[in-house]
Image (cartoon, rainbow, N blue to C red):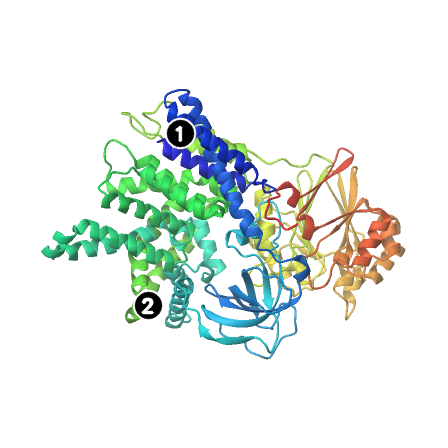
Amino acid sequence: MLRQIYSLAFVFGVCLLQLQAELPEMRWVVVLFSAAVLLSFYSYFYPNTFLALRKTLSFGLFLGLGFFWAAMFAYWRMADTLPHEWESRDIELIGVIAELPQIMDRGVRFRFDVEQVLASEAAVPTHILLTWYKMGGKYEEISTSTLPQVNVGERWRLTVRLKRPHGNANPHGSDFEAKAMERNIRAIGYVRISANNVRLDGWVNYPKYLIEHVRQQIRTRFSQVLADHSYTGIQIALAIGDQQAIPHEQWQIFTRTGTNHLMSISGLHVTMVSGMVLGLVYWLWRRSLHLSYWLPARKMAVAAGVLAALCYALLTGFSVPTRRTFLMLAIIAIALWSDRRVSMPAVLVGALLIVVVFDPWAVISPGFWLSFGAIALITLVTFGRIGKMGAIISWARVQWVITLGLSPLLLVMFQQVSVIAPIANAIAIPLVSLVVVPLTLLAIVPLFDFLLLPAHEILSAGMLLLKWLSETPQAVWQQPAPPLWALIAGMAGVVWLFLPGGSGMGIFSGFPARWLGVVALLPMFMISPPKPATGEMWLTMLDVGQGLAVVVRTEHHTLLYDAGPNYGETDSGARIIVPFLRGEGIRQLDLMLISHADSDHSGGALSVLAAIPVQSLLSSLNSDHPIQQAATNSKPCHAGESWQWDDVHFELLHPLAQSYNLAKRKTNETSCVLKITTRHGSVLLPADIEKDTERDLLVRAGQQLSATVLIAPHHGSKTSSTETFIRQVNPWLTLFSVGYRNHFGHPNEKVVERYRDLGSELMRSDRDGAVLLQFKEDSITVSSWREISRRYWYDR
């Protein structure tokens, strides 16, 4: 028991390190090592004195060991960094395609292991992520050349342009920089058009490349056999763990029905493969008396089952859930081979420790918490229980426990829980795990390709049913992300609720006051997030990269001003805006205002309209624009329109109504300009207006331009922010919504200097992340998300 407690202390130490804003000084390791030596000597010579104190100190010691173990890995990994002076410069490299390439609409993305840097004096990290665009470069003119086929293990000479991993930093959003750190990707970039981009002779047959090469061959063969079939991506994901092959629309079905775990190569699939091989080997081995005398059939079958689990886990990408399953099976196998008994909690904790020791960043992955959390819950309700249940009742109980037990984690990570998950899983688990997966796995062998088609037909029938379930009203419970204390109380409530019962009947019987677990869970579902008071305004300029998206909240209303860019395979609406709105408890938008048609301002609007009820739309879009077609209660914005929300005044200053009659109107110059005024301060949102419109506004609405906060016109480009305009606005704070090292060079340095000379405070999304403003108490509270949630891996 003590070993398990100390193992958990080590894991807690690793988790603590991943929450740090700065890495600790490693000189404290000397102090920790000295304390460990002294404690060991004391325990040896005085084993029975101060036992409780020694146990407490030992717990702290292992916690510190975990903390500094993770810190050591972090120092080592962060040392392999792209210098700032080599960002956005052409560099020639020789390296190897290291992982399964991801096919996208606009190109192909792949991990590249750098072997040689041909540019003199350049320093490039060993592991980088590259995108080879069909147009030859992310922002270059379209090339007539076709995109070459890239395969795992090939050695290439490429001309690339790199930058440090830098993601969007927003409340309730995903952390790309954390994922890049976990995957050991220390630079990202794209392949430039160059005659020197050539495939070199020789295939690199290292084991890690060989496994990825096999995965790519399987994906290619599946794509050919299942060409033009709807669920090809699902079968590819089930076979090799390539989740990128599943379209977004199908992922939505799995998310709403709580069946997405089946698409991530869950432990159930690995265990099933292992069990099938174990049973087959056991049956065959027992047929031979000679072999059984040489080695018992049970031991041989266990070894074969573990080997099968390892092969399948490697084939599917060796994600955290598959690692956890393989390690648990391996620990059980070692115990059986050595004729020792081992408890399920010990197996789980042992697997947890090994995963974290070799990958300290696993703890920042949602899959880590959901995978280990699910098995911990199953262990809690099955291990050491007296009495037996029927198979159906036992399975139903496990489904109920996992659905309720994981709800705190799901609400924190995704702000939603599938209400119909038990029903959907009752259909999907047997169908997928017992029919579709076995047929699909058999089709990995080329001779059995024909099995893919019947597997697809069966899968299609199941998907139709899941789609129908996902479209039922209230299929998903959505709510704001709960605070930390509510999460801790909820997790404690889950454990308390599922503690062993006694002789009574029902879930609340036996263990004293198990109903208190339900009470501890209630804050997770009942607490409402804070909101502005009457007359106050909360404004959040989200970090959407090179684009703009601003959420404005009053006491009872919410406005979205612009919806950020489209990123190709996804957009800022789905990735950033919708998670933020859900996390903040915003269930509907009273108004969406799309300033103009440029994709960096309107690219995420359709995703928002599909996910969140929008009462009305204001825009300068043409009537045939897709956003206009998707919205209800839509009308054009024009100067002079105004409204009042909760003692906060909103007024449109541009464009003029007659601007829509111009035959060739410029989208930037007809941007909807919005002025918001509170008793605590004001803000001006001018979108992408340029010099001509600025001069027009100075003439028409000069007195109305003055504002406490200004979002810089056109992202701070040199075609806007004239000196007379910004002097008339005279902002105390100026915000720039720009992408990290964007190719436009926004904000222009002369424009920035112009604002600085005016005495304005400056903030920018590429450096500060999302900017959060609260207009209240006759002042403005300003904060940046990169400071609020700072982690040591954030780029400085």
Of residues 331 and 560, the one nearer the viewer is: 331
Q: Name the residue under label 1.
A: 496
Q: In this view, does 551 lie to the left or right of 223?
A: right
Q: CA gap, disc 1 to disc 2?
A: 47 Å
The earlier-in-sequence mark between 1 and 2 is 2
Q: Mark 2 points at which residue?
A: 453
Q: Residue at (79%, 63%) from the top-left corner?
A: 659
Could you say whether the residue bearing mark 1 is in a helix, strand or loop? helix
- Give the residue furthest to the top: 49
Which quadrant would residue 340 be assigned to in this image? top left
Q: Position of residue 166 (x, y in %)?
A: 62, 54
Question: Which disc is residue 331 wearing?
Answer: none
Q: How crowded is mark 2: few (under 14 residues within 10 Å), some or many (20 or more)?
A: some
Of residues 643 and 391, the one nearer the viewer is: 391
Q: Is residue 791 left or right of residue 367?
A: right
Q: In which quarter of the image is the N terminus?
A: top left
Q: Position of residue 187 (x, y in %)?
A: 58, 59
Q: Residue at (79%, 56%) from the top-left corner?
A: 654
Q: Position of residue 437 (x, y in %)?
A: 32, 58
Q: In this view, does 521 lie above or below 333?
A: above
Residue type at mark 2? Leu
Q: Residue at (51%, 32%) from the top-left corner?
A: 523
Is the Cβ of the residue at disc 1 closer than 8 Å to that at disc 2? no
- Give the residue furthest to the left: 289
Of residues 385 and 471, the one nearer the viewer is: 385
Q: Is residue 213 left or right of residue 414?
A: left
Q: Residue at (45%, 26%) from the top-left corner?
A: 56
Q: Where is residue 386 in the image (x, y as percent from the top left)?
A: 25, 31
